[in-house]
Amino acid sequence: MPEAHYARRYPYGAEVVPGGGVHFRIWAPICHRVEAVIEGGPAVELRPEEGGWFSGPAEGVGPGARYRYRLDGEPSLFPDPASRFQPEGVHGPSEVVDPRGFAWNDYAWKGVPAEGQVLYELHIGTFTPEGTWAAAAARLPDLAELGITALCVMPVADFPGRFGWGYDGVCPYAPTRLYGTPDDMRRFVDAAHALGIGVLLDVVYNHFGPDGNYIREFAPQFLSTIHKTEWGEPFNFDGPDSGPVREFFVSNAGYWVDEFHVDGLRLDATQAMFDDSPEHVIATLARRVREVARGRATFVMGENEPQEAQLVKAPEEGGYGLDALWNDDLHHAARVALTGKNEGYFTDYLGGPQEFVSAAKWGFLYQGQQYRWHRRRRGTPAFGVPRNRFVAFIENHDQVANSGRGQRVHQLTSPGRWRAMTAYLLLGPETPMLFQGQEYASTRPFLYFADHHPELAALVHAGRREQMRRFRSLSGPEGQRLLLDPADRRTFEACKLDPAERSTRAEWVQLHRDLIALRKTDPGLRAGHTGGVVDGAVLGDHAFVLRFFHPGGGDRLLVVNLGRDLILEPAPEPLLAPPARGLFWHPVWSSEDPRYGGQGTAPLDTEDNWQIPGEAAVLLAARGA
């Protein structure tokens, strides 16, 4: 196999060569000699290249072959940091994978554009009792029928142990063996596309997990000596020898889109992706995702705790070109409004109506003001950012787990307030996201779980307890006892959704299905979602109104009241005025519809002025008397 005739797809890893054999390539700048040791086969010495690279072919080797690397003739063998599959776990041998062996059926798929999305976050290991790609694929028709347009799959890059969230991954190119094979993941994506659902993958480009990370044996230059994070050493994106490090992760972003047909990424904790280079690595990888998509629409969103609006601004405006950012501000305000607690990192939120009006109009609530929890200013101005660039949610993996017991928010509030807040989420102008099971008010918790060896597991459990002490209610002995051991398999098993529960909670499914359908089809709402004017006003201590202005006069009002019944007498608020003389506001949808478990809805806009039901949300349109 003449090596010069093979053009590699990616700079790192083992690639099957057309016509036979495998080509290996690895960056190991601290090594003088690297061998690929094939199980049941030869040890292939790789040829050194400039810059610390080693590469070479192995004839008579093909898909399914397992291998490790030997460095400088030492007896220890190490898995490939760019392994495509770790069938025996992150400490075992790597397996050669040929992506060309999978027959795709999604060639007509157009991708996931930035506008019009309804997202759904899920964890493959707990989305079904089986916890596999195949089992998750069998549940996709339910999500398609609900109206979900794209999934946000929690990290799948392989990690140690029998279960975990995935944020401690150490093999960024290898889908974890816990959920199936790489082709099982491809089948899942293919099945989603067949149902009209996109797939976004959560990726962690800010640190490696503490166990199973062998990168130091090859290239300690991967880790920054300048920057620090709370999770460990961040990656070296801007120091000496950072070029191969940047390419490792930029190629990884393209790899998932190219070889697994995912429609985009969710970038975890972008504030910990430190980079002082002329072009930030986030901008580089976002561009790579779009390049390899070859015309398919892609969606790249970020988690960014400091709320830096430049991440979603265009590169020509000095931004990084992401499509969206998660909006923690909205979640925090909703959580306080629904539970009455603003302890811990909810300290800077009141849960009042002005916060929901401001979030609908401007996205982030903190765009440079003082933030007591951090003892510094938080956020940057985002007034020009389109509202659909903010991802809104009232549950996600972190926030549910941080409730101590891992309880769902509907278990911490009243049914009426939960229905009303769900309406605000799914009808509002931001891109909404649900968390697995939220659509039927699942009673299953979502807790922090991570399977580590005993010494590390004890440290993780202690760290989790210390982290939760930030919440006053969890800081005492009683609260600390609520925090289950993350390494106990029972903690993980408790989080698995029960498919039978969905069929017994039809009113919640109907609520979400109807709201998503309204979001997609109502012209008055759509005008506000696609750049039209949305304004709002506070109506009372717990009540507010959003008005979606429609160019043709088909305005919509969304009235939300999280408190008791409210009579507006007087009602000097212009947003409540009908768009023309002789028109009145009539309910077209109400969270108090008996189909959802409500008590029915009387008229709001009456001759006796406005009468707003308590713990309810009502969508209104203007019509004749």
Image (cartoon, rainbow, N blue to C red):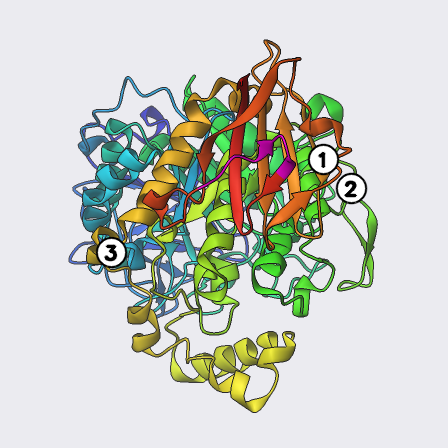
> To which quarter of the image does residue 489 belong?
bottom left
Stretch of the chain drawn in magenta: 601-610
Queried whether the magenta region covers residue 598, the answer comes back as: no
Image coords of residue 203 (percent x, y) = 47, 47
User: In the rendered structure, are the residues bearing label 2 and label 3 in contact, judged by CB atoms less than 8 Å apart?
Assistant: no
Q: Residue 310 carries which label?
A: 1
Element at label 2: loop
Residues packed near mark 1 inside 10 Å, few (<14), some (14 to 19) or many (20 plus):
some
Question: Between residues 236 and 103, which one lies in front from this camera angle?
Answer: 103
- Against 552, residue 521 (above or below) is below
> Sequence-wise, which precedes: disc 3 or disc 1?
3
Element at label 3: loop
* Residue 384 seen in the figure: no
> Sequence-wise, which precedes: disc 2 or disc 1?
1
Residue highlighted by disc 2: 380
Image coords of residue 18 (percent x, y) = 23, 28
At 34% from the left and 58% from the top, the residue drawn is 442
Q: Which mark is residue 181?
A: none
- Amino acid type at circle 1 is Gln
At 77% from the left and 62% from the top, the residue drawn is 374
Left or right of 61: which side holds 412? right
